[in-house]
Image: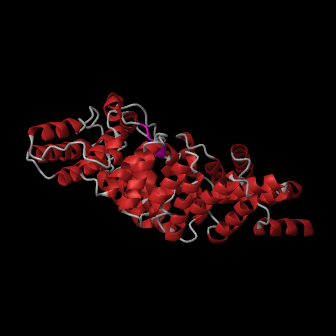
Amino acid sequence: MGKASKRRAQARTPSPNARRTIGPRARLALKGGALLLLGVAAAWSTSRLLTRVDKTPAGSAPAAASRLAAVPEPPETVDALPGFGQAVSEADRLLRQAIRAEAPPETVGEMAGRLGNLYQANTYGALAEAGYTLASDLDPDNPQWAYLLAFRLQERGETTPVTPLLEHTVALDPGYAPAWLKLAENRFKQGAFEPARAAYDRRLALLPGDPWAALGLARLAIESGDWAEAESRLEGAIATAPEFAALHRLLAAVHAHAGHPEAEAEARRRANALGRFYAAPDPWVDSLIAQSFDVDWLLLNVSRYALLDADLSRTLFDRARALAPENPDVYVVLGEHVETLDEARRAFELALSFDPSHPTALARLGELLARQGDHARAVDLLERALEVGAETASVFQFLGLALSELGRLDDAMRALEEAVARAPHNADVHYSRAYLLQRAGRLDEAAAALRRVLELRPGDELASRALADLSGG
C-alpha cells in the first residue's frame, strides 16, 4: 500500500469487523481517527429507541435545534478519500436543510440513517452510530436503523443495549434471518441460553440447514452437557455444508471430550484445510461496502465475496475500477478472479503497464507464464518480483519449475529448497521438489518428498501414484 493509502487508513476509526476480514494483500492499518467524536457518540442513548425523545411538534424550534445538535459534524479527515468529502458534505447539508425546513420526522430519520450508511461504509464507526441513533429515534418503524446500530455496538463488544435493538428489529421484520442470528449470539453471550435457542430455531426455520444456526445450537448443547446432541447437530450440518470449517473445529472438541483422538485429529485436519471462519451473509451490512470510497477496502472485499456473493463481488470491483481506473491493484485483483488464464494474463499485463515494478503483478504473471510454458519470460518476471520484495514460497516454487525446464537444475533446486523453507507445510511445494529430485535422479530423496506430501495431504492421488512408480522402478 502506498503512503496515501496508509494515511487514509490511519485517519479512520478501527472496526473489529474490518480486522476480521482483512487479508495480506491490502495490509490495512485502521487506526485512530475520529476519536474526538467518541464522547459525542457515547452520549447517544439506545434506550430511547422505542419512544420518541422529542414530543415537541415537528415544526417547533426546540425540536429543530435538538435534531441539528444530534447530527454529527463531519470529521477533519473527510477529504482523505477522494470523493468522500463531497459525498459527506452533500448528505450532511441535505439532512440539516430538511431539519430546518421542518420535514416529517421519518424523512429526517431516513436521511440520518443514509448518512450513517455512508460513514459506516468508510469505517467512521462512531459517526455511523450517531446517524443510526438519530434515525432510530425519528424513523422507528424502519428495522434497518435499529439493526445497524445494534451491529455497530456488537462490533465493539457491547451486549446489554444490543438485545432490545435486535428484538425491535425482528418485531418489525421477522423474516430477516441475520437479525435472528445476531440476537441468538447476543443472548448466548449474556448467558440467556433458552432465549438464544429460540432465536437459533427461528433462523433455522427461515433457512433450513443453515450451518451458523446449527453451530450455535451445538454450542448450546455443549453448554448443557449434551455432547451427543452436539455431535448429532454438527454431523448433520457437515453433511449439508462440508466446507464450513467451524463445524469441523467444534466437532474436533466433541471427539476430544469423548476420548476419540483419531476422529479429533481428522476433524482438526479438515478444519485447518478449509481455512478461517467467515461471518454469515448479512445483506443490510454487506451491501454498504458498495458505498465505500476506499479502493483498497473495496478490492479486499472483492476477494472476500467472490465465493459468498458473486454479484456483490462484481459490484465492488466495478466501483473500485471506476474510482481508480489506473490503479494496478485493481487489475491484479481482476486477474485473480477471471475465469481463464488468457484473461488473467491480460489483467496482470495491464497492471504492469501502470506500474512495471508491481511485486504482486510480476509474481502472478510469472507464475501464470510458467504454467503456460513460457519459461524464459517466467524466469525474468519472477526474478524481478524477488528483486522488489515478492519473496513468497510460491514465487520460489514457480521459479524453480521454470528454471528446471530451461535445464538449469542446480538453480532450480536452490529455488525449490527456498520454497520449502518458507512453506514447510505446503504439500504443493513438496510435490514440486519431488518432481525436481526425480529429474535429477535423486530417487530416494524424491520418494521421501512424496511421503511428506502424503503426510500433509493424506490420500493425494498424484503423490500416491508417483510414489508407487518410484517404488516399482
Residue 177: image x %, image y %? 46, 63
194 displayed left or right of 454: left
Q: Is residue 289 visible?
A: yes
Q: Which residues are magenta?
A: 14-18
The secondary structure making up most of the magenta span is helix
Is residue 26 located in the magenta-colored stretch of the structure? no
Residue 35 versus residue 214 in the image, above or below: above
Please name whichever residue, 86 or 222, is drawn nearer the observer in this view of the structure. Answer: 222
Residue 156: image x %, image y %? 46, 40
Is residue 17 located in the magenta-colored stretch of the structure? yes
Residue 33's image quarter? top left
Residue 28: image x %, image y %? 46, 40
Q: Furthest residue to the right?
A: 472
Point 45% across, 51% down: residue: 300
Point 29% across, 34% down: residue: 77
Residue 243: image x %, image y %? 63, 64
Please name whichever residue, 308 or 396, is drawn nearer the observer in this view of the structure. Answer: 308
Point 68% across, 57% down: residue: 221
396 displayed left or right of 9: right
Image quarter (top left, top right, bottom left or bottom right) of the C terminus: bottom right
Q: Is residue 351 visible?
A: no
Please name whichever residue, 361 or 319, is drawn nearer the observer in this view of the structure. Answer: 319
Q: How are the residues colored? A: secondary structure
Please name whichever residue, 5 or 463, is drawn nearer the observer in this view of the structure. Answer: 5
Image quarter (top left, top right, bottom left or bottom right) of the N terminus: top left
Q: How many marks?
A: 0
Residue 51 versus residue 374 in the image, above or below: above
Residue 380 versus residue 242 in the image, above or below: above
325 displayed left or right of 111: right
